[in-house]
Image (cartoon, helix red, strand yellow):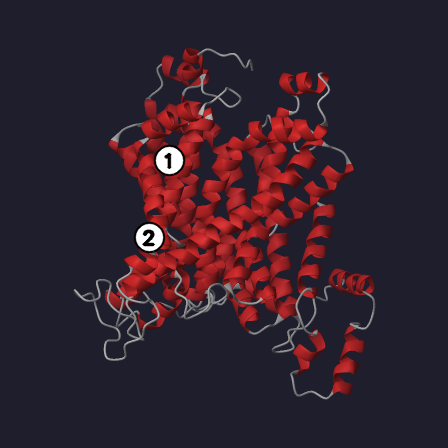
Amino acid sequence: MIPVLFLVSVIIFALINLIPGDAARLFLGEEAPPEAVAALRHELGLDRPVYVQYLRWIGGMLHGDFGYSFKDHRPVLATVVEKIPVTGELTVASLLVGWAIAIPAGVIAAWRQRTVADYGASSAALAGLSIPNFWLGIMLIYLFAVHLRWLPASGWAPLTKDAVRNLRALIMPACVLGLALAAVVMRQLRSSMIEVLSADFVRTAKAKGLEGRVVVVRHALRNAVIPVITVMGIQMGTLLGGAVITETIFAVPGLGQLAVNSIYGRDYPMLEGVVLFSALAILLINLLVDIVYSLIDPRIKLAGGRS
Amino acid sequence: MSVAVGGALREAAPGRGAPRGARYFVRRFAQNRLATAGFVMFLVIVGLAVSAPWVAPVSPIKTDFTAYLQPSSMRHLFGTDELGRDVLSRVIFGARASLEAGIVSVAFAVAVGLPLGLAAGYYRGHLGDVLMRLTDAMLAFPPLILALAVAAVLGPGLGHAIIAIAVVLAPVFMRLTRAEVLQQREREYVEAVRAIGAWDRRIIWRHLLPNSLAPIVVQGSLNIAGAIITEATLSFLGLGTQPPTPSWGSMLNAAQQYLTQAPWLAFWPGIAIALTVFALNVAGDGLREIWDPRTR
């Protein structure tokens, strides 16, 4: 993980340094006198060689200094940390929506393979994969906010301050992200369930007279869930990316909206911070997925047990 | 796996590595009606995009201030937008940006990822290790966020959006190619070719590449679908295709402001994206079913 982290930081550093123009000029604005720009360049270390800049940058981050926003001059880290609970809540809610749909749908589609239920669920999943999430978001806003007036199109409030308002504002974005996730998870669960259902131990369980439902849920589902967890780990990146869109559409003040606003405002230190944080989050989640594997499946050992 | 497998056996186990002629492949694909329908649908969309100047009723950028935000009518089947432009024509022309972005970005990603993957898989050792670590790092970024960051640094525009998508996809193809090559290079036929004295270059391009191609083609067809969505997303956020050139993503962006007065503006571009992506997903699934026996 350490070499990957190092390379992640190099990629972000290289990316930000590819930006045409001068960070000091961007920070101070077009009208700033040249002396002030030169002074700031010196202060930021922009007149040093590139590798020194990189080391200073990475050294600062190790001390918790992620730079300062071009826009409001606040520390990047503080703003990012402020936004984490919002995106975190949205992510958890979408996971719940996704699982609530995908697990029953995937199990039934595999159990009743090649029936109307299977074809229906599988086609719905394929359609779910094809619908762009920002369009789904706009359509939901039209239906539930403009037309029916059941839910607000925006108006986020923190969970701790106004729970009702928070949950009402959460429903639509969580559904947009959750439906896309459900489509992917359902397809994976269906195919791994089909594989497991033809395994010997499932036949044994049936042969000893267990009820069909018990076999499916207790024996098959438990074993089919491992590839699904792998897919979940991969999907976390998609989910974080999707948060960019849904947070923008529904005006949810999370990391995604921060990313888009910092792009529009050319606030590069902030963008750098968000991108770095999102990569860190993905790496941590992957680590978590590995740990979950070993908890679910005793055959998998965490350290060096896998080939 | 033996090369001289009989026709009947091939039919029974069309696994990877078995010889597959073009005719066999076409027959298997045609048996899957949904996949065939998807492929035909995709061809129709490509045809519409190519012949847009002749198919579209009017110019997609012709404004008409006497007929703005009009609902569907005989003159304007999909209605008109805030500048009185014909939405149907814009949707048809919008297919060009989407398809261009989807196909070109995947082509770029393959052009970069495939040779690197071949090299990393065939010559293991330090070069391969370094390349793999690099792809690990690239894949650690949420795909859309990396694409956004690259597009933001490059600046708005369709060409830049295409580069941003290709940057995100290249490591995917590299990993996939490498994994295939690692499997293929241990096969007996590679040993046989090496034994008769073939050069590395010949082994890689004439033997490893053709035998590793199937999953790359499947991944490619599915990734075109993903790239079309990503381009639409970037355009939606204002980083892709720039006005007045129509693109489905930027049309949806503009439509948001008029959602109460003119919901059709938001409806049709989304349908166009969903249909195109659906067609590609279905066709890609069909390809995978032929080549990957595990998914059946």
Give the secondary structure at mark 2.
helix
The answer to which of B121 and B258 lies nearer the viewer is B121
Letter of the chain that mark 2 sits on in the rendering = B
The part of the image, by quadrant, that contains residue B272 is: bottom left
Q: Which residue is mark 2?
A: B48
The answer to which of B167 and A204 lies nearer the viewer is B167
**Amino acid at dot 2:** Leu
Residue A155 position in % (x across, y down): 40, 70
Residue B163 position in % (x across, y down): 57, 56
Quarter of the picture containing the C terminus of chain A is top right
Residue at 31% in and 54% down: B271
Vertical comparison of A252 with B178: above or below: below
Left or right: residue A227 compared with residue B32: right
**Amino acid at dot 1:** Gly
Residue B264 position in % (x across, y down): 26, 64
Residue A106 is labelled as 1
Crowdedness of circle 2 by 10 Å Cα count: few (<14), some, many (20+)? some
Residue at 46% in and 27% down: B291
Residue at 48% in and 33% down: A225
Left or right: residue A187 compared with residue A29: left
The answer to which of A48 and A251 lies nearer the viewer is A48
Q: Residue furthest front?
A: B54
Residue B188 position in % (x across, y down): 64, 16
Letter of the chain that mark 1 sits on in the rendering = A
Disc 1 from disc 2: Cα separation: 36 Å
Quarter of the picture containing the N terminus of chain A is top right
Of tags 1 and 2, the one toward the viewer is 2
